[in-house]
Image (spheres, rainbow, N blue to C red):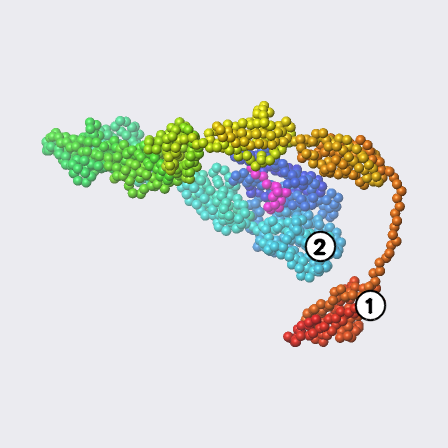
Amino acid sequence: HHMTPLNNQPTNSALFIHVILFVTGKNVTFVTKVDSSQMLRKPTMKWLKGKWMDLGSKAGKHLQFKETYDRNTKIYTYEMTIVKVVDGDAGGYRCEVTSKDKCDSCTFDISVEDAGEDAGELDFSGLLKKRLTIFLDSMCLRERKQKEEPEIDVDVWEILKNAKPCDFEKIAFEYGITDLRGMLKRLKKMKKVEPKKSDAFLKKLDPAYSMEKGKKIQLSVELADPNAQVKWLRNGQEIKPSAKYIFESVGGIRKLTINKCTLADDAEYECVVGEEKSFTEVFVQEPPVTITKMLDDVHVVVGEKVEFEVEVSDEGANVKWMKDGVELSRDGKYRFKKDGTKHWLIINEATTEDIGTYYVYTSGGESKGELDVEEKELEVLQSIADLTLKAAEQAVFKCEVSDEKVTGKWFKDGVEVIPSDRIKMTHIGRTHKLVIDDVKPEDAGDYSFVPDGYALSISAKLNFLEIKIDYVPRQEPPKIHLDTTGSFVNKNTIIVVAGNKLRFDVNITGEPPPTVCWKKGDTVRAYQHKTSMEIHADAGLSTEGRVRVETRKNLSCFVIEGAERADEGLYHITVTNPAGEDKADVMVKIVDVPDPPENVKCTGVGEDSASVQWDPPKFDGGVPVKGYLMERKKKGSSRWTKLNFDIYESTTYEAKKMIEGVLYEMRVFALNGIGMSQPSASSNPFMPIAPTSEPTRLTVDDITDGTCALKWLPPERIGAGGIDGYIIEYCVEGGEARGGLCCRADIEGLPVGEKMLFRVTAVNIAGRSPPAVMAQAVTIREIVERPKIRLPRQLRTKYIKRVGEKVNLVIPFQGKPRPVVTWHKDGAPLDTGLVNIRTSDVDTILFIRQAAREHSGQYTLSVQIENMEDKVNLEIQIVDKPGPPIAVTVTDVWGFNAALEWKPPKDNGNCEITGYTIQKADLKTKEWFTVLEHNRRPSCTVSDLVMGNEYTFRVSSENICGMSDDAGISKNTAEIAKTGLQQNLQPYKEKDMCSSPKFITPLVDRSVIAGYSAAISCAVRGLPKPKIIWMKNKMIIGEDPKYLMQNNQGVLTLNIRKPSLFDGGKYTCKAINDLGEDECVVIGRIPQACDGNVTPLTIL
């Protein structure tokens, strides 16, 4: 079987219902293919049963999934195989594929039949031989529902039972039933022959229950046995009581209540009582999704974003968007968005083609909204003004429109204006400008600006004015009038902060209007000419740019936009006309923040501080530097920390509160009256570190003629810098110190007999530590010390080692000067070929790699200085296992005993024999058994030999190294002869165990409470068994039911049932047999009652 491919199916475009009939025990495979050629990533496939059950988690032997990919066609193939179909596999299925924001799905139903089942009256096999695929247009279905009368509460199940099979589909769609599988299964079960009467159920579950989503449903059965226990199962899984599932039991009625039904509760339920079951199916109907917030009409301009918003009644609902009867799909133009119950249709950039009516459909409603898109209108913010100009003047036509992206063309008398050196056109933002220099008569006419893409024209007229002068004009020499107030710090000097705007207005008089020329040095910055003093404000002559000159009536304005350092200098202004000339100089000074300081470096470090130095900035900004601000940070960090908030004037600074051993970086800012500079370059990383403290415990270790050995301990405080080494310095007492870096503590070449002073200094990367100084001067002189051997304790007795072991003896000695060491063995000089000797200044070592017997003997160590000598003797004994005993002989045999004798071994292993081990062996079995161990004498007696056997013996010798490898075997054997034996048994005399009665445990004190049962006990011994008599006040206690008498193996007990005040008195226990009698007495006294109900009874 295969399913329709999902890639060609539009989402939610129609209702798909597939019904497939299978026979139990068969295998079935479903195949679906997905085209991924338009996908950026691999799609995700889910196989679902019912509404939400994900079958991927149930993969195993029964459900198997497979996925393949064809790289050529870019098609994914997904397979689901059901192995050996069973009844439980029937139901509705759905496969769902998702990729990013796209989703598609397909549904199908499975119905299962038994292989030998008779269809009966309702035979649907012909109807279901092939898959039924029914396409119903959701629009028609929705219109039909709207025309229907208001809903009436009808029993759909009764309608289905009484309907003809050909009408099932019509009824299912009319009442919203999509599960044909459940319909067919229920009809077949209901129309079968009535089942046998159940023994456990008086009333079973109904065949099916139907309920709307979110409501409560109750399943009820009636049992024959009111005390029977039931189990409720859902899809074969037992249901546990909870807030959702409530169990009720009233007499023989058992109820299961399901609260707030969801789509997950659509399942098969069963009630189990013992071996009998009652089945039913619960169908949860999802209510139609309605629209709670309708679409609104939208009015936008071309290019704007459009959003249609609708709100539905269910969060999980799907909606369908349509425009003019055509369903909208996800593509580059349309986007769908969903958040809870809200859904949006989004058009990023609207065009006139998007105008129309948009519909949104749900399963229970629809809504529509109109979209109106208007063309953009261009608004003229500033129109062109008419101009009337004279020859050689400049004409400027300027207009401003609402859209800065709009371009256009300039026309003169309907002909497009072509730019030239004299005619320039500019477009800056929303402003369009046409500039005509040196206006001529032929430039007169109608000028217009036409925006591209708009039916719009902005027009103005240029009039050329010709002036004829018939009189002689009045002449007045030009004059410059400087205003030295305001930004002038002194005469003719202006100070401007860099980046600010400078505007310098100069009043000029003269007739005819003079020509103004601005220069910086020898460079002409601007040249202005006035032909008349009567110049309109909107026709002022100016030069465009950052540095420019603007001209008004009797006024020349020098403007610098965003002053820079290069603008600083001496500016010259010259005004001329036919009547004369005038000049003036203006000094412009640009001030700025200073440059960053330079060469920031660390000049020294301490334990938690560092000294930093830097060079002042090359340029102070034209204003003296007031001071500096410092910052530091740890290397690798991006967080700078300020070190000072007040201005620091010096170029050296000592930073404190730093962490020893951590790398830091520094940077510096310079400040002047204008502001703060950029930060300097970071310094090279440096580490606060301090020298160590002085070395401790400096002492003299040894002195010889010309040498001195010193020793000391490391400093108490070392710090993060560690120790690189030590400097040892020495001098004659009262002289000048000398020395250097040294890693040794032995100083040679010292003058003999002089008093020397020594000091030691620790060195690390931070420098030298304070010195450790000797408290007193040291005299360089050899000290004579008598030789002395310090023999270790274990060598003061005989030193014993086994053959083959290693011998390593270290013997320390002392003496000055270095003594002469000699070794002897047994009075002769030691042969160094057999023994290794190593001698140092303080000890000597005797070493034997593998000891042998010839190494045994007495060793003598001699230590000599001139005529002084010290000697010690060492006894070394090398031992080995002994040889076997010799001449082992059986000297005598008697009874079950044998006497042995032998001689000690020839080789005792170079040590005393500690014992012998004797073993015997029967000549029949020849197995050896140990008889004696550690026998110290060379003879023994072996006992407990077996009569009739012949024995041989062997003896092994033993010393501290162990037993000998071989044993000495006896030369002769010991044979134990057989002899006749007779046992005289004494006649058995039976002991008389009879005895008179005797109490071995008397009666003891007992305190009881009146009204509570009590017992008194004793124990008696006697043979024959004595007769027991209990008496109270010398009266025999007979068959009184108040008393219970027991005898258990001689333990006698008298139980008194609920004693009262009258039960006090003298109790006697008597034991009697033929040999005598014995009695035990106890007296009971009743104390004064404490309470009327509780009275203590004391038996003494």
Q: Nearer the viewer, residue 695 or 1094?
A: 695
The answer to whether residue 605 is left or right of residue 821 is: left
Q: Nearer the viewer, residue 625 or 9?
A: 625
Residue corresponding to mark 1: 1076
Disc 2 secondary structure class: strand
Is any part of residue 359 visible from this angle? no
> Height in image: 237 above or below 487?
below
Instruction: Say the numbered circle drawn on residue 273.
Output: 2
Quadrant of the snapshot with the N terminus: top right
Distance, label 1 to label 2, CA atoms, is 76 Å
Q: Position of residue 145 (x, y in %)?
A: 57, 50
Within the magenta stretch, is there residue 56? yes
Locate residue 111: give its quadrant: top right
User: Residue furthest toward the front?
Assistant: 867
Quadrant of the snapshot with the C terminus: bottom right
Locate residue 965: give its quadrant: top right
Residue plotted at (71% across, 42% down): 24
Read off the magenta span: 43-58
> Height in image: 669 above or below 906?
below
Q: Position of residue 310 (x, y in %)?
A: 49, 47
The answer to whether residue 202 is left or right of residue 511 is: right
Task: Rate crowding at label 2 as few (under 14), some (14 to 19) or many (20 or more) other CA atoms within 10 Å.
Answer: some
Q: Nearer the viewer, residue 884 or 112?
A: 884
Locate residue 618: give its quadrant: top left
Disc 2 marks a residue whose amino acid type is: Val
Disc 1 marks a residue whose amino acid type is: Gly
